[in-house]
Image: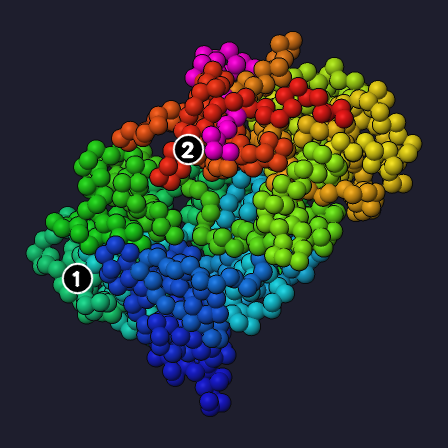
Amino acid sequence: MSERSERTGGAAAQPHRREGATGKTLRFRFDGREYEGLEGDTLASALLANGVRAVASSIKLGRPRGVYAAGCEEPNALVQIEEPFPEPMLTATTVELYDGLVATGLPGQGRLADRPDPARYDAVHAHCDVLVVGAGPAGIAAAGVAARAGARVILADERPEPGGSLLGTAETLDGAPGREWAAGEAAALAALPEVRVLRRTTVLGHYDDNYVIAVERRTNHLGAQAPADVARERVWRIRARRVVLATGGHERFVAFAGNDLPGVMLAGAARTYANHYRVLPGSRAVVFTTNDSAYAAALDLAGAGVEIAAIADVRHAPGETWAARCAERGIEVLTGHVVTAAKGEGEVSSVEVAPRPKAQGPGGQAREIPADLLLVSGGWTPVVHLFSQAGGTLCYDEELGAFTPGETRQAVEAAGFARGVRTLRECLEDGTEAGRRALAAAGFAVPAETTPPAATTLPTADEEPVAAPAEHVWLVESGDYGTHFVDLQRDVTVAEVLRATGAGLSSVEHVKRYTTAGTAHDQGKTSGLLTGGVVAHALGVDVAELGTTTFRAPYTPVSFAALAGRDRGPLHDPVRVTALHEWHVASGALFENVGQWKRPWYYPQQGEGPGEDMEAAVLRECRAAREDVAAMDASTLGKIDVVGPDAAVLLDRLYTNMMSTLKVGSIRYGVMCRPDGMVFDDGTVIRLADDRFLVTTTTGNAAAVLDWMEEWLQTEWPDLRVHCTSVTEQWATVALVGPRSREVLARLAPGLAVDNDSFPFMTWRDAEVAGIEARVCRISFSGELAYEINVSSWYGLALWEAVMASGEVTPYGTETMHVLRAEKGFPIVGQDTDGTVTPQDLGMEWIVSKKKADFVGKRSFARADTSRPDRKHLVGLLPEDPGVLLPEGAHLVDTSALPEPPVPTLGFVTSSYRSAALGRTFALALVSGGRERIGERLYAPVGADLVPVTVTSHVLYDPEGARRDG
């Protein structure tokens, strides 16, 4: 490459790049073709520099679409990034160009990546006194005032560099380009100790109490050169005392025939490409406007080398100064004219212009003007999204023809054009005053001077011509509205809006849903008010009366990866293991996922042959627990410390049975129900002191139970003096089970009296076990003599190894635990219940207190539905063939032959096992009127067979409970 080519970024290879453009050359590929751009380009500006007009196609009609805007408001130019990592549905106007970028145009929808994203994403929390959103003139002025007073300030802007509207214009401040002023002020701000300037950061949502969510794109613009150790995107969760919204405005277009053709562009966007990116989006242009702003765009483009064929102004009296400036350049101004159509095959080649109908007279015929560029300005809409999200009201500004901020209950200020302020000088002054108001409201002394940090006075802006009133025209009337688009991304036309209003829809919200206008990635930034204007025109009402649709977060699309942050892969669903995990691994245990926990499922013994399968291992473990002694790692049971003077009151309200009468040193089994009376969880409550309890829960429900407790405490009973703390990970628990468990415990804890009289069932004792301080509980989930030994998790492995070394103790896993408890008819919440089961359905009427005045779910037991005789009850099932193992989930019927579908079922199998103690298979089931069916024969359809079963009590082993005490 020649020296000149490197210096100018290969401009010669970019036919629409202005002379004098400088920057490093970047190579990229789009739709399979190689191109060059310059550092600082967006993909859109680089494509325009290379003469690429059609970038994408529309989602419904497949019409070619080109670049329409220059920022996040872009409705057309959707692309898919292919390299370095696939990412769909991005706007070419916001993708910063980098070397090696590979992209393709999209027909309104993209493809998800087929491989994991290697990039990192993270989130941070930040607090500040003043958050300023938008680093344009007003935002910089507001941030400067707040920063000079010593406030903690965050200035966030979605662009790579500060300046806002100054970046796309030729306006000067103090005689220098406006972007240079903005860069200097931002640098001065960033140098202050209490100021944080966030570039490439979009504020997505504004919530209660000035809680604001923003996303910073940290390395997206670096492509394959992005450091692996730097997060690609970062979510900022900001809590601000005051917020200043200096969010500027979006230009909107007008509905006329062919207004979607490549080559039709917003006038302000074309001005930005010419001034900021030094790219000419066309060679010969027609300008169509309803306001003065397009004149400045036309003059800038003319100065850059674009021939302005004509300006069609809907007004009959545009600003005199603008008209004079155009006349000096030989630009024809057609007052009282509209563009009736953009024409061309695949892109604009000519523009049809005609007088407005009311101005028609002699010589009022339409004329066709050859042009490859049509610049449109239908007016400007303040960006009020965040203000509205914050609960602010909007007011219609007749002069502006748009909605502006009204009142809000939150500590929010709007500044600059976001508040409807028009001129650059006024925006600077308004931003300064907004900063002063924010400072005062935040409790700071407001400085006398009102200048940004790097200036001694407010900069002098160019004198702007006296503005002529804009005229608010939403559509160019026609006999056929089939190509008068109001929403380019959704392919919504005026014809469809008229169809909606013709069907009787008069609400802009209803029309939005009928037509889908404003529901695409751009959320109607350029089309929302235009759609409302067309609806108002059709109904003959004022836009002010019609109102707007609801502004919802996020303001711009955000990647799921950014929202997930580091919460993905192992961190999304962490694998939790107990303190004994390595021992289980070394002993050959196979594991079961229980919630996030890895729990030993069973321990197959490996002999000379192929070793035990699951059935053989579980039967062996069950025999050891029933006939000898076995141990299980029960550390995963949820454990919640409930502490406070009202702890007993809370537990009485949450459990169906009484907990306040529990004595210190005792344990009670309990059931929690939801307000509808259905079983939510079960477990034990251990009273450690008058004001302290330890609640145990099922493994999978531990977090839900703690959340349940907190919800009631924080929303319904905030007066209760109680604190709930999860201590699941703090305790390691070993369940010692079987007829010889007392003997083993006596050897491990010689100082503990373990006889029945000294240590009765459902009590606990502090003791040293294997020389470790422990809390020993007499609890049994197997029906056998059993103890649960709890020690600090630091000593869990030492305790387990001592238990294993104390004699022939058999380790057992969760499958054996399930068999043992099912033989005794102990239900597992979530397996033997399905959200429609009451304690009475489980045969546990005894656990529902009749003494308590109230508890969660009590009133629901008075409903007729909860006492229906045909409710499903938990029962046992014995297959007539003792070797048949019923599949869990199998349905039950009462006929030996299935009738024609639909076949009514009586219930279903919840648990099914092979039992060593019973010498056969058995099952538990929920069966309609089950307790009245004990002794009956039912049938379980299994494949092509109907398996006969006999209904029995759900307690199939040791119904008297004689084995519990050894």
> What kind of element bears circle 2?
strand
Mark 2 — residue? 947
Residue 17 horizontal side relative to residue 587, left or right: left
- Distance of mark 2 from mark 1, alpha carbons? 81 Å
Indicate the position of residue 751 as horizontal and vertical percent values: 92, 32
- Image location (x, y in percent) of residue 487: 29, 51
Q: Amino acid at mark 2?
A: Val
- Give whichever of 414, 707 is nearer the camera: 707
Vertical order, 952 against 458 (above or below): above
Report whether 615 appears left or right of 753.
left
Residue picked out by circle 1: 352
Say the numbered circle drawn on residue 682: none
Residue 3 is at least partly visible in this image: yes
The x and y percentages for residue 767 are 87, 32
**Residue displayed at 63% across by 32% down:** 917
Start-end of magenta stretch: 857-882
Question: Where 339 sits versus 962, above or below?
Answer: below
Q: Is residue 806 above or below residue 184?
A: above
Classify residue 208 by image quadrant.
Answer: top right
Q: Position of residue 280 (x, y in %)?
A: 35, 72
Q: Picture quarter containing residue 685?
A: top right
